[in-house]
Amino acid sequence: MSGVLASMIDGLLVGAVYGLAAMGLSLIWGVMDVINLTHGSMIALGMFCMYLLFAALKINAYVLLLPTIGAGLIIGLVVYWMAVHWVVGRSMLMSLLSTFAVNMMVIGIGTAVWSTSPYNVNFVLPGITVGAYTFTGNHIAAAISAVVIALALQLFLYHTRTGKAIRAVADNREAAELMGISSTVVLSIAFAIGIALACTSGALVSTLFPFTILSGGVYQLKSFVVTILAGLGKPFGALVAGVLLGLLEGVVTPFIAVSWIPLIEFGLFVVVLVAFPQGIFGKRAAA
Amino acid sequence: MILRRPFFWIILLVAAGFIYAPVHGNNVSLREDLILIAIAIILASNLNLMIGYTGYVNFGHIVFYGLGGYVGLYLTTARGWNLVLSALVAGVVVSVCAFLFGLAILRLRGAYFALATIGILQAVQAFVSNFDPWGRSTGMYLSFNSYQSLGGARHALWITYFLIIAVMTLSMIVSLAIKNSKFGLGLFAIREDEDAAVVLGVNATMYKAIIYSVSAFLPAVAGALMFFKNGMIDPSIAFEYMLSLEGIVMLMLGGQGSVIGAALGGSLYERLRSYLLTSPVLSNFHLVIAGGLLLMVVLFAPGGLIGWVYRLVPRARKVIE
Amino acid sequence: MNTILEVRGVSKRFGGLVAVSDVSFSIDEGEILGLIGPNGAGKTTLFNVVNGVYKANQGTITFAGKDITRCSPDQVVHLGLARTHQIVKPLNDLTVLDNVTVGACFGREYLDMGAARKVASEVLQRVGLERTDMMARSLTIAGKKRLEIARALAAKPKLLLLDEVLAGLNPTEVAAMIELVRKIRDSGISVLMIEHLMQAIMSLSDRIVVLNLGRKLAEGKPDEVVHNSDVVEAYLGFPDIVDKLTRME
């Protein structure tokens, strides 16, 4: 039985990272009604960013999260001006396609540069041993990092001017513009933050598991599940829903062959989509 | 009625071309190229029914093709059924499932529907990977003597080719027929403003479920035929997410909403893809080029190739549908 | 006189907000019933309940003898009840003709394409929209309003619900629209219309129902209603203003 408990706690910890990833998706969706299909490739870029920084500087990977966030913000701005700015406000299909196009290009370039062989970030923190079980230090550090970043985001959105501006634009773009808020600037910042969150979650994943440029896809799908579970607009909701998803995985893994897990996750996904229009916690933007 | 549309005869002409070209000179490599194009046209045309006509973006469209492949291969291999019957039954089974699932997920609008279709694709793939009678993640192989009933392997490949061309032709004819029918008008109304359509008397719930299941039928039949021809199937090649998305790229390239747009987009993209994948230099960049193309289309020419033609020659709309 | 629509004790709540509360009235065949009241009184909500977009929490709605309380909007149109929207909903990427053909195809007579197209052309002529090959998105606001009405008429309704058809129109367009509504009634279609333009309501309506805060405040002939002190207080302002307004034709 305690094997299940250990698995659950592990799941909880990894779930925090799922939550962080989902926050990026949810923020962009909630603020500009764009479903960011570059999300997966941005997570993968975050993985490689951490890899490159670590290979070059060889210092504590968790310190390297800061430049990773910076890189993510820059990448986010580039993607925004390349593809997103022009489709905000157009039909959902257009924004899905333009972000998907960028995704294809990033994956294409990534495959050309890094091929599809697995990479690793070999930075290991000492674990914590409780009884017969050891919780890897990396898992704990990843979870703590995710929570800290989520708190920072919450503070930013609710206690700074820019954050307020973002929430205003999310609520009603025209009204915000009438109040003198430049929606373009705000949208680009919000998008950049969303991408930075994705990159950071990727960077955290890189310290946990081996990865390739294609690894982002799995986390993108998990982010969708988490975002739908949580509803839009509340970053903390995404974090909690992510943890729940991780917990679910942790509970189920000892009993069921790993190959059934995608079926459970996607089955859950579709059921929640159809049965809970509001998500389980928050509200949805108009479809 | 439909026989009066000039485009109907253009479709038949194209089909005749597809049949004549490889047969004349017994050109097997041309046949192999054309069959890929035909599959692309089948997938894009049927996807157009959902995206172009009804305005519902189906990201998981390939699930019909893959599932049809599985049902078809199962019936021919494990049950020894005749190919045509297996393919038809595969089509019926998959479209009935689509109708039932459709009733549930078509209640969702816009992006939520798109996500649900991704969820269904992934869930089906995960399910099939665990499903014993269908070989789990290893999949199924066709026993060689299945070809015997069709007169041997070489003969069987030609027969399968003609059947797929028939499915391609049917796909385009069905698209054309729906576009000019009352049912089609109802779909367009749903696309433009679903709430207004309902207030005007369109039974949107039923119409959407019907078109979803119609859009599943021919791809499922094609899947059954194609995987029979290839002799094997497994979850990763049956339910390739990328193929699903490429279907959408084809549609956007050619011009969603028109029969020819789907066909053109399918053909052009398929040619581009084959060329890129076989070129030593460019094969790594297949995704980059495809992505770049898609971005260009979305940003500058959302009506696709045909949209551009229609703008230049508005009268073309009546003939080239 | 036969009753074409009977609304009895209808209430509609959205969570804690009561939008319509215990409203009852009826419409006779060939009548034009005006529905007025301040913004937020529940008029459009009432329309939405009558035509099935919302389900009533309480009460019944009977149309031409049939209980339509639980019917969906598409079922209601097939029975002969059509409506227009306050904020017009043209089918933008379809032509004007196609827009109205939709109405004829899926309306009370459920015609096939050929017959529907003919009905659509004829209705468009009646309504005064000539350029039928134009894309609906290119119409002016007045044109779009006419399109709304044409679509509803193409469904061959027995009762037409008009939601603020005059809003946003200039005086010439208003006069033309008032004429059109009269012609519609004269052709045998009963009308329930929401309007804010007092002179229009006064000149067109046979009777008026006044809603305020979701409840029926008054009902009766136009002259009685506008001099009703509750109505004046809630909506009109001063009693004299009504006489002034109605003289401003």
Image (spheres, helix red, strand yellow):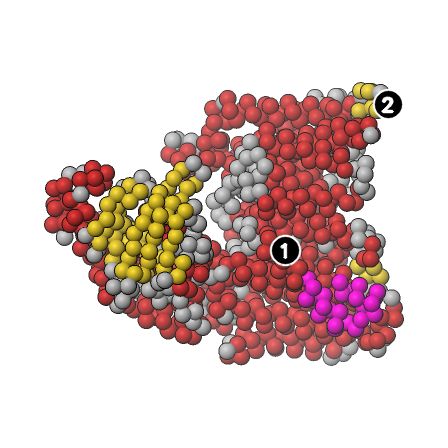
What kind of residue is marked 2?
Answer: Ala
Q: Is residue B226 left or right of residue B216?
A: right
Q: Does dot 1 land on a helix, a strand or a loop?
A: helix
Boundaries of the magenta span: B71-94
Q: Is residue C219 left or right of residue C104?
A: left
Q: Which residue is mark 1?
A: B101
The answer to whether B214 is drawn above or below residue A238 in the figure is below
Camera-side residue: B99 or C22? C22
**Residues at discs 1 and 2 both on one chain:** no
Picture disc at residue A132: 2
Q: Nearer the viewer, residue C211 or B201?
A: C211
Residue A262: say if magenta. Answer: no
How crowded is the residue under tag 1: few (<14 C-alpha within 10 Å), some, or many (20+)? Answer: some
Amino acid type of disc 1?
Phe
Task: Tell me the residue at 71%/52% (across/down).
Answer: B124
Say few, some or many: other residues with alpha carbon within 10 Å of mark 2 (under 14 / 14 to 19 / 20 or more): few
Point 80% across, 53% down: residue: B131
